Amino acid sequence: MTTLSDTSSWLPLDGLAPGFDANKAPAVADLTGREFALDGPDGTVLTAKFTDAGVETEHGVDQAETFLVDDDLYYTQFHPASRPDEAVSLFLDLRAGRALVVTTTIGEEGTPRVTQRFTAATLRDAAVSGDEPAPTRALIGRRAMWVYSTEHAYEHVYLSPHWYTWQCLAGPEKGLADTDENSVWQLRPGIYVFTWREKVIPCAAVTVADHRDVTALRSHGVLFGLDESGEKQTHFTFGAHGRLLSATVHPEEYDPAAD
């Protein structure tokens, strides 16, 4: 039996994987045959060509999964074989001509061990409109439940621009909870890239979550980190259905969402 306060007994990332992807959305092939060059303020961020074999970038050709998040809004996930300590999450908004790249990296040491870098870009030769992807405080104060399978359910409490608390409601981690680093970026109104970086288990997650209907939340994402041995990378995608449980309204002078 897991001793809740003994973090050395917590489930490793590879132990969580079986069955965790039951609510994952089907991958789509909508982008096959298309190529996108992403430009940032300092030049080309990434060039991605979608083929039957996967996605071709400067890293080479890697297997990839692409999910449809909303009309003309796609999420692609891949783990470059040539750079095994990195995972790439690519968000393409074809309607707005914008993109966001999240690079998750396993470091040699540090807390958290797995870190993330966010790069907003535009799609070359596309008509660009709307706001660029940017950090947001829109989730602060919300408490949401996410169901990943018939066996796995968690709740998230979004505390501040830097911290959130999770608690496992069902599954092999039931009863475990912690407060970890998080980042939230808005892609479209009500659609957010929510990421977290754990301090106990060497892993991080990237999700894209649709909060427009608080009774029917939907997310797609990836977990990336090290297995129980601490030597091998673990990378798997998943999905979840959810709903808003509650929302906290702080007095204005104590509001953590305020600047």
Image (spheres, helix red, strand yellow):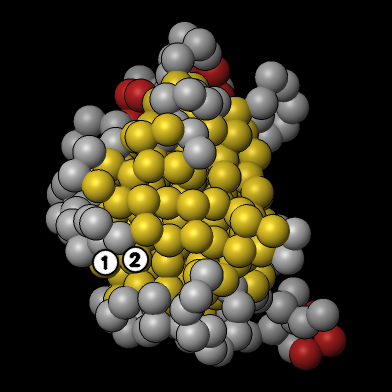
Question: Residue 44, percent across and down?
Answer: 62, 56
Q: Is the residue marked by circle 1 packed among few (<14), some (14-19), or many (20+) residues within 10 Å?
A: some
- Considering the image in quadrants, where does the N terminus appear? top left
Q: Quadrant of residue 71?
A: bottom left
Circle 1 residue: 68
Between discs 2 and 1, the one toward the N terminus: 1
Residue where numbered disc 2 is placed? 74
| Residue found at x 20% / y 64% | 30
Residue ID at (74%, 88%): 251
Most foreground residue, 117 or 29: 29
Determine whether the residue tagged by mark 1 lies in a helix, strand or loop.
strand
Q: Quadrant of residue 61?
A: top left
Amino acid at pointer 1: Leu
189 sits left or right of 258 in the view: left
Residue at horizontal 39%, vertical 76%?
A: 94
Residue 56 in the figure: left or right of residue 116: left
Nearer-the-camera pick, 187 or 12: 187
Q: Neighbour class for label 2 at 10 Å: few (<14), some, many (≥20)?
A: many
Observer-nearest of 160 and 108: 108
Task: Pinpoint residue 229: horizontal percent, then vertical percent.
Answer: 47, 9
| Number of residue marks | 2
Helix, strand or loop at label 2? It is: strand
- Residue contact between numbered discs 2 and 1, judged by CB atoms under 8 Å: yes
Q: Name the kind of residue labelled 2 in the image.
A: Tyr
Q: Position of residue 2 (x, y in %)?
A: 41, 23
Is residue 205 shown above or below 245? above
What residue appears at the point 73 percent right and 65 percent down from the top-left corner? 41
